[in-house]
Amino acid sequence: MRTKVFIEKMSEDKKSLCNQFIRSFSSLNIVDDFRRANSIFIKPNLTYPEYKKGVVTRIEFIESLVSTLVKINSLIKIYIGEGEGGYNSFSIGEAFKNMGYFDLEKKFPQIKVINLSEIPSKEIEIDTTRGQYRINLPEIFFHNIDFSISCPVPKVHCMTKVTLSYKNQWGCLPDAMRLKNHYMFNNIIFMISDVLKFKYAFLDGKYGLDDNGPMIGRPVETNWFLASNSLGAFDLIVSEMMGFDWKKIAHLREAAKYGFIPRRKDITIIGDIDSLKRKFKLHRTLWNYPTFFAFHSKKLTYLFYFSKFAKPLHDIMYTFRKRPLDG
């Protein structure tokens, strides 16, 4: 299948958005894939306990996607899930409730909303350029899911520069203390996405997050709708639209070594990319840097989050700055 990225200005109302999904399915030649599927998994970006512009995927976007899928295949089983807030920062169950996912589950009998931290997981081994790495992933992906869909928003990230269709899968790690794996993030995130059968990506680009992320930046209205049959192509093109060179994004550069990022000239663009581009910039704060260094160091991660010094260090830091979930 030829690698394609479908790009349009985001439709406003529900009916138009459903039609937009249909156009994207047809352009990507993936309608039959949905017709044949018994069960799929949808991963929205839910990194906050309530809706916040540019930070989390809108429930309206997910509902329109579900509604369109059900019209194509009324018997399809649709799992929608996320793990607990990283570092136990918030309850994903409360987030599901606050953002309307349990109401959506009641509206569509095909939907099952799942907390990925509360279901059985199994350990797998990933082959990386730094050697074999063992990690736990939810069992449901190995037995119940035909393929998965990533639904991110376009936002900058103070640790990874951007968080798009690959980074979105970090929330599939069931351990709330998944930050212990941060030092291997660049080497494993695209592998995890592949193991969990992530096949398609759809961008809820009504709003993006500029300046700083993933939670406390400046929301901007972008009105982007993108869809792709390749997560690598999707992240390359969205990065380009945001004004970033994908080769300077470490996890995408690593993914390219394994063939997950296609050559730009091999991507078919359906739509007018130039008219929708908007330059984003990442401005790290002073307090981002200790976390940034810990993100890339196993030893610093242990010191800041698991050692006897972790609580005093965090107490000191939060006397000078807000906790991310405080606003």
Image (cartoon, rainbow, N blue to C red):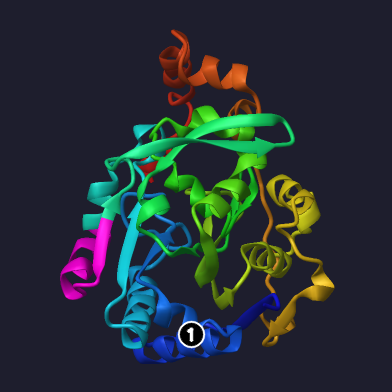
x, y percentage for residue 161? 66, 49
- Taking the spot 54% from the left edge, 69% from the top edge, the residue there is 200
Let me know if residue 18 is in the magenta part: no
User: In the picture provided, is 99 more to the left or to the right than 2?
Assistant: left
Q: Is residue 287 visible?
A: no
Residue at disc 1, secondary structure:
helix
Q: Is residue 251 visible?
A: yes
Between 266 and 293, the residue placed more toward the observer is 266
User: In the picture provided, is 17 more to the left or to the right than 6?
Assistant: left
313 over 251 or under it: above or below: above
x, y percentage for residue 176? 38, 34
- Taking the spot 42% from the left edge, 30% from the top edge, the residue there is 177
Badge 1 local density, few (<14 within 10 Å), some, or many (20+)?
some
User: In the picture provided, is 281 more to the left or to the right than 315?
Assistant: right
x, y percentage for residue 327? 38, 46
Where's the N terminus, which quadrant?
Answer: bottom right
Q: Which residues are magenta?
A: 98-113
- Taking the spot 57% from the left edge, 76% from the top edge, the residue there is 226
Identify residue type, mark 1. Val
45 over 276 or under it: above or below: above
Between 325 and 248, the residue placed more toward the observer is 248
Residue where numbered disc 1 is placed = 31
25 over 129 or under it: above or below: below
